Amino acid sequence: MSNNRLTTRPWALIAVTVLLVAGVAAIPQQPTTAVAFVELDLILPQMPGYAQAESTFTEDIASYQAEVEALRISLDSAVAAYQQQEPMLSPTVRQQRQAELGQRQQQAQTREQELTQRAQERNTELLAPFESRIQAVIDGLRAERNIGMIFNVSTPGNQIISVDPSLNLTSVVIQRVTGGP
């Protein structure tokens, strides 16, 4: 008889169903958060002026690298000359030359660090306007399309392993940063 309670009392089944439906309807619905992605590596080259900025940066880097290489060659030559003359030098002169070589090496390292810092600053100086423009477009798209997050899938090691291609906003960003339709 206990197995038939709900079947013999249909009003009980209806009451339970109504309570369940009412309970589900009372749960506040959370808005779904959309996720999208872009490929920044494809966007930057499409931007007006980027090719010129990249060319300028490449020239600057080549200049810095040439200076660093010249410093290394000069230091290597000085070390080789010292090593060749070392057996014939007095202990005092040997110590003096070693100190000079150490000072030259320190100067070369300092200059290399300065050039590396300058290269980083130049990279930021040249790319900042492009990055700001892209960020503004992406932020606008995110707000316009009510997207919760947009990932850059060009970044190595990202955690995205599968994405819906319809969420790719790369072509839209390219159109907007290039002034296209």
Image (cartoon, rainbow, N blue to C red):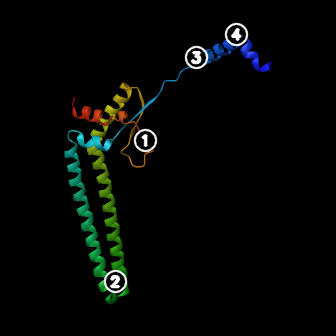
Q: Is residue 68 above or below residue 96?
A: above
Residue designated by label 3? 25
Q: Is residue 48 above or below residue 95?
A: above
Q: Secondary structure at mark 3?
A: helix
Q: CA distance from mark 4 to mark 2?
A: 110 Å
- Mark in the foreground, 2 or 1: 1
Q: CA distance from mark 2 to mark 1?
A: 68 Å
Badge 4 amino acid: Trp
Q: Secondary structure at mark 2?
A: helix
Q: Residue at x 58, y 16 (%)?
A: 25
Which numbered circle lies on residue 141? none
Mark nearer the N terminus (4 vs 3): 4
Residue designated by label 2? 93
The C terminus: image quadrant: top left
Binning the other alpha carbons within 10 Å of mark 4 as few (below 14), some (14 to 19) or many (20 upward) gives few
Binning the other alpha carbons within 10 Å of mark 1 as few (below 14), some (14 to 19) or many (20 upward) gives few
Mark nearer the N terminus (2 vs 3): 3
Which numbered circle lies on residue 162? 1
Badge 1 amino acid: Ser
Q: CA distance from mark 3 to mark 1?
A: 33 Å
Mark nearer the N terminus (2 vs 1): 2
Q: Residue at x 34, y 89 (%)?
A: 87
**Mark 1 vs 4: CB contact within 8 A:** no
Residue designated by label 4? 11
Residue 94 position, x and y percent, is: 35, 83
Q: Is residue 4 left or right of residue 97?
A: right
Q: Residue at x 68, y 15 (%)?
A: 16
Mark nearer the N terminus (3 vs 1): 3
Mark nearer the N terminus (1 vs 4): 4
Binning the other alpha carbons within 10 Å of mark 3 as few (below 14), some (14 to 19) or many (20 upward) gives few
Q: CA distance from mark 4 to mark 3?
A: 21 Å
